[in-house]
Amino acid sequence: MARAKTPRLLPVKVTELEMRAVPVRREPAPSGPRIALMRASGMSAAFYRFLYREVGKPHHWFVRRDLDDAALRSDIEPEKTELFVLYVDGCPAGFFELALGGRPEMVEITYFGLMPDYQGRGLGRFFLSEAVFAAWAHEPEKIAIETNTLDSPRAIIMYQRMGFAPVLQRDEKVPAWE
């Protein structure tokens, strides 16, 4: 019987950030492409996996990578999670996920990202602004987001420019997505 391969572990520095006040303005959508941001309810496990893989693989996202359908559906049920999909010229370009069920005083942007083909097109600030305002619509005391050294180095800069402040850093090891 073959043994399961032990995943290669990647060292990362995780930064937790919080925002305690609603930004004064929304970032406008870039001009040019047709953009639609849609809240997705009842998302299939297959479509979620597609988004998670396409956005998260370059950054070695792992938490939901190996969940079976039942566990995944439980994690993304509408009572505790909101999912939004960004479409550019009719194609899925990214997604963000809000965790609503943990602590009522906080909404966490648990996943946020663009597919590699849509990065560098001026979509990031607009997309993050929409995630932030969707989180504030639940009227929490604060919103939170995490980033780490496997994400784009521009991510933490963008988060801070949007109004997030670092509150904690920790070292971790994450399994490589190979």
Image: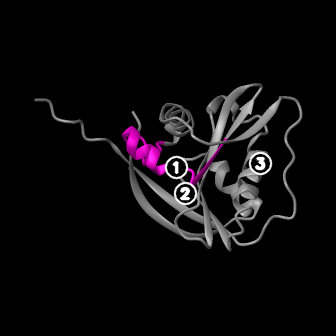
Q: Position of residue 115 (x, y in %)?
A: 62, 34
Q: Which residues are magenta?
A: 60-84
Please give left or right for residue 69 compared with residue 157 in the image. left
Q: Earlier in the sequence, mark 1 or mark 3?
A: 1
In the rendered image, which quarter is residue 87 located in? Answer: top right
Front in this rendered view, residue 90 or 55: 90
Q: Circle 1 sits on which residue? A: 77
Queried whether the magenta region covers residue 143, the answer comes back as no
How far is disc 2 from disc 3 in space, using C-alphas? Answer: 25 Å
Which numbered tag is attached to residue 125?
3
Of the pair 15 and 55, the residue shown nearer to us: 55
Quarter the C terminus occupies: top left
Q: CA distance from mark 1 to mark 3?
A: 27 Å
Give the answer, above or below, for where 111 lies relative to 99: above
Q: Amino acid at mark 2?
A: Lys
Q: Residue at x 10, y 29 (%)?
A: 1
User: Residue under circle 2?
Assistant: 80
In the picture, measured across the screen, residue 95 lies left or right of residue 11, that is right
Quadrant in the picture for residue 29:
top right
Which residue appears at 78% of the width and 35% of the height? 36
